[in-house]
Amino acid sequence: MAAEAAERHLELLREEREAELAESRAWQESISLKELQRRGVCLLKLQAASQRTGLYGRLLVTFQPRKYDSDAELPYNSFGPGDIVGLYDSAGHNNPLSTGIVTRITSKAVTVAFEESRDGMLSLDRECSYRLLKLANDVTYNRLKKALNALKQYHSGPASNLIDVLFFSSDPSTFNETKPLKLYNDSLDASQREAVSFSLAQRELAIVHGPPGTGKTTTLVEIILQAVQQGLKVLCCAPSNVAVDNLVERLAGYKARILRLGHPARLLEPIQHHSLDAVLARGDNAQIVADIRKDIDQVFAKTKKAQDKGERNHFLSEIKSLRKELKEREETAMAAALTHASVVLATNTGASSDGPLKLLPENHFDLVVIDECAQALEASCWIPLLKSPRCILAGDHKQLPPTIISHKAAAKGLSLSLMERLIKRHGEKVVKMLTVQYRMHQAIMQWASLEMYGGQLTAHPSVAQHLLKDLPGVTSTEETTIPLLLVDTAGCGLFELEVEDEQSKGNPGEVQLAGLHIQALVEAGVKAKDIAVVAPYNLQVDMLREHLCHRYPELEIKSVDGFQGREKEAVILSFVRSNRKGEVGFLAEDRRINVAVTRARRHVAIICDTRTVSNQAFLKRLVDYFSQHGEVRTAFEYLDDLVPENYTQEGRSERQQGAKLSAAPGPKPQLPPGRKPKAAGTKPTCQKPEARFCPNTSGPERESPGTKDSASRFKAMLVAFLESSEMRLDFPPSLSSHDRMLVHLMAEEYGLQHVSTGEGRDRYISVCKKEPAKPSLPAAAPPSKQLPLPQPQHPSRETPVPPEPGGSSKGSGKVDLKSLHLERVQREKARQEEATRKAQEPRACLQGSSRKKDKCEAKGKAAAKSRADGVAEEDIDALISAAIKADNTCGFPCCKASVTTLGQLCLHCNRRYCLSHHIPEVHGCGEKAKAQARQRISREGVLYPGSGSKDKSLDPAKRAQLQRRLDKKLSELTGQRKGKKKDKEK
Ligand SMILES: Nc1ncnc2c1ncn2[C@@H]1O[C@H](COP(=O)(O)OP(=O)(O)OP(=O)(O)O)[C@@H](O)[C@H]1O
Ligand SMILES: [Zn+2]
Ligand SMILES: [Zn+2]
């Protein structure tokens, strides 16, 4: 049984390995070194800053950027401890001088341990320029293979019974008597205590299932301490260095004797303190070992100065014998340290018998604990498992499984973790689930609990109601008082970029929306370091970084997969997919969505096209949950240059005729051709009116049951109201926020004004017929001091969205949307007023400034000035108009042309330009435009490993061909843009 399984697994591993190799070949052959560096897998222009002899007599070389100032930082990279790297000199192309293992990396230097190279000694010149390239790691593969082969041939040994249980040829059993436990951590909750005693009572196998934030590590630490207390020798592993370090850090607080093998990923003192290197350095043998290493370094220096080959050989053989002595002494010291330790910690592959553990007798360990087991390849678990009669596995198989490159191998079972396999077969009798979670607001947790964890989770009272506003320094605003927010782009034309590569998806509209929401949070006092933006696609992660990093250096922007295991106070999710076909790609993985949502502690905002994502049942239920329990906004509320897709002119006028409305919409704004260069479908006119977010006709597939009814009910009410002589219509406070949104949208379509009044449960929405057009902004400016003013901002910030010039008189349909903002302002004001003097309700139907104006910033000077001078109340109007005027002229230096009606927004620099300057090449964004276009068809790389799997590895020839096609396309695009410009100028 076990042998067959091992054989099958070996086969899948081989497939995976081939896929991995093919991929890295394709990379290296068709991508320039610069590009490799950009993707974080290559470091160029390094110098060997120092070298010395390390453990096992390996040569440790520290590389730094080859720059004149010593403070230079390494470029962004994905190098980490344990990575295998090739060292190349700047001339050499194909064969590395040597290969080594990264042992340490900081922002300024990377240290690599080299084994002896073929000719005996690697000699590095301080003056030379080197590069390091990450190599496909066959150490790991070989260890996995070795473990599976050992499993296949296993006859008698410590793990015999365990193997039987793990392959179902015998049932798990328990120990007969168990003593009551005295806990080290007496704040454990009931489910955690149960998991502890259960795990200690199981003879072969126990599984601790820890949903997000339920204290899985806390529980494991208690289990390990209890096992040590019982005198057991524990081998504790996890698939990643970070997870191992996490356990080391938590265990270090207790008295247990712990020893960390391998290369810690984190440089924290307690973790370094328990590393094998550090333990050996403190040992009796340490002085002698240090002396021998010093000797080696000295002889090594002499080798370099050697006059002739004979002398050199002499030194080399001296080094050889010194190394032999070093190795013997080190191994004695290591064996002593290992034997002394109660808990040995390593990554799964670091527990391999080709490392220090070979120094221990076969039956040394009594218990193997594997954390994050659901994220490990089963093969990697077998490396430690074969060393013990008993195991405790912990993890959450409802989060993402290990990343597999080969789709075929994954489908055939390589991505099925040991933990999941065992739960599927043995069922509840081997599992205890932790059920109290200490991370999320109740409303965030509830969705995950119902969808993924059988409704069994409860939120600990310390977190159940916590909101952003409860953080120190955060004020109560609309955004900081809600745990769930859905920003819906349905019908807003914010499509995903259309790329040839299925795996790379981006959505510039969602990038902008994310930026605006972050701005609102930051302005309310939420720290950027407490916010994460998470997207399922690497291209979107790139675009978000490009747009947001410089403004909020502490903001974390990651792929979903890269953020697993982490948490943030506020999480903004950009789902990216928005297309006519309703394709959701790998959003369709429930576990990915579960991970994404459950990273958030106090606030989660989802930005998505509900119409596209609702094509998938799981996502539809997520959207429904947010609609029912959270606040829903439409992207219209945020962006002023949107052209609602369903508002075709015919559609609109038909409806308006019926409604006897005189408000003739102005010329329909065209979607600027430069706006979304390759967005799927930039032709709003050919859209049928009913195809999109049109409340009265919305397709049944995106609405929750009943919504369609409410939509027609609201429509009927509005039509009746329009035909009546009433000026105002109030809707009941019982409407859900989704219903309210429907009313907003409908009111807008009929050219009605709408506003929400009241607080909380008593909030209701009213619509009013419009009075004749009002003069523009200044006249409609804040009637009271409490209305938020345009925020003077730091001039270096980029303009997110230029403001609208007029008030609601502009009649292009979109202006009405501002009342949504107005309403919000209004509610905020109401809240403030109520707080100070429990007083009268605000009047409805105001006109005035818009949400966008708060967010917007002028070209700089006006705004900066207002800050410098301090704002005199009377000057506010003037300032606002000045700011708006500044923003209404072309962003090209010295160009005074107005961009109010004909301007176009450049997505690269976020400025608005007149028609002669809007082309990226003309105003200086040419490179960015090209880069973006290139990005669109560039494959996702190792840049953020694990974020999604790749479909097929391109062979180099195909890849090169693609590259040529891309270049051609790029120059065509450039040509086109230049051509258009010429036409215009004629
Ligand atoms: N019994 C408890 N009482 C109070 N707080 C607890 C308890 N158990 C865990 N916590 C808190 O919950 C948080 C998460 O704990 P821990 O790191 O053990 O969780 P985890 O489940 O391993 O996390 P992850 O979801 O990342 O795997 C920590 O801040 C911890 O202090
Ligand atoms: Zn630009
Ligand atoms: Zn211009």
Image (cartoon, rainbow, N blue to C red):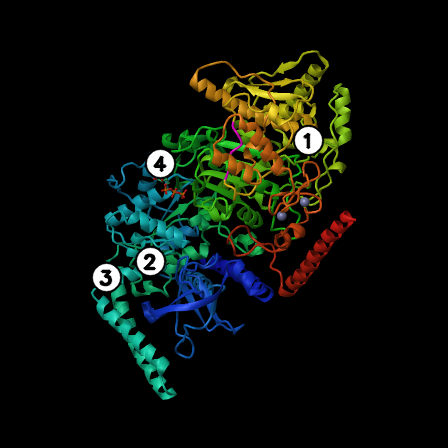
Circle nearer the N terminus (1, 4): 4
Query: Type of residue at label 2?
Result: Pro
What residue is pinned by disc 4? 191
CB atoms of marks 2 and 4 within 8 Å = no
Residue extending furthest toward the top: 725
Tag in front: 3 or 2: 3
Tag in front: 1 or 4: 1
| Ligand 1 is within 8 Å of the C-beta of the residue at disc 4 | no
For ligand 1, which image quadrant applies? Answer: top left
Q: Is residue 302 magenta?
A: no
Q: Is residue 609 visible?
A: no
Work out whether 790 lies above or below 254: above
What residue is pinned by disc 3? 282
Helix, strand or loop under label 2: loop
Q: CA distance from mark 3 to mark 2?
A: 32 Å
Q: CA distance from mark 2 to mark 4?
A: 31 Å
